[in-house]
Structures are given as C-alpha cells and as structure tokens.
C-alpha cells in the first residue's frame, strides 16, 4: 500500500476511505505479526508509513464529522 497524501484522501468517498482504512489496518496486523514472531518485515519503514496513513485518514474523518455537527448547530441557532 502506498502512502496516501492529504489531497488524495480528500478526493476519496466515504466508502472508499473505509475500505482503505480496513486494508491499511490489515497490513498493519501483518507487519506486527512478523515483528512479534521475531522476524524482520520485508519493508522496514512500512509500519511507520502505515501508521501515519491511518492517522491521516482518521484525522480527515474527524474533521468532516466536526464540520457536519458545526453546520447542524448553525442551522438550529438560526431557526430561533
């Protein structure tokens, strides 16, 4: 799995983001399994890359959720 940049993440839909996140978490489990068994992963920097990409996706999802709740609060206060 390649690194997903912020611009690439913004272009993806919510379902695609969920699929990518699940795929990245699966990759992370494989790398952790290799490390736990005392082995050396094929790509040494893959664990760090995967962790950061997962964090980017979660950060984007959280910012979208906050923006949605902020919009709802604005609508509610305007109705009063």
Image: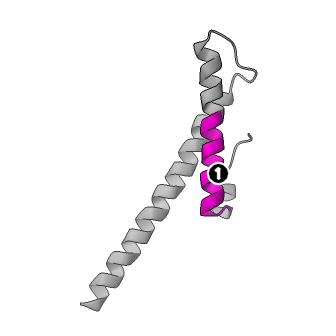
Circle 1 — which element?
helix
Residue found at the far bottom of this picture: 79
Q: Where is residue 55 in the image (x, y as percent from the top left)?
A: 54, 43
The answer to if 18 sits in the magenta stretch is yes
Our reading of the magenta stretch's main secondary structure is helix
Which residue position holds label 1? 19
Residue found at the far top of this picture: 38
Residue span colored magenta = 12-26
Front residue (pair 50, 29): 29
Above or below, comparing residue 25 to residue 32 in the picture: below
Residue drawn at x 70%, y 22% is 44
Front residue (pair 15, 46): 15
Quarter holding the N terminus is: top right
Q: Can residue 28 be seen in this view?
A: yes
Residue 12: name its quadrant.
bottom right
Residue found at the far left of this picture: 80
Q: Position of residue 25 (x, y in %)?
A: 59, 38
Q: Position of residue 58 (x, y in %)?
A: 52, 50
Colour scheme of this structure image?
one colour
Residue drawn at x 68%, y 29% is 46
Residue drawn at x 34%, y 80% is 74
């Amino acid at each position: 799995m390649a690194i997903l940049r912020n611009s690439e993440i913004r272009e993806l839909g919510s379902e695609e983001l969920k699929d990518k996140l699940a795929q990245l978490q699966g990759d992370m489990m494989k790398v952790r399994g290799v490390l736990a068994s005392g082995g050396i992963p094929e790509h040494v920097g893959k664990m760090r890359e995967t962790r950061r990409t997962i964090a980017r996706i979660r950060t984007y999802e959280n910012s979208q959720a906050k923006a949605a709740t902020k919009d709802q609060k604005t609508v509610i206060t305007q109705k009063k």
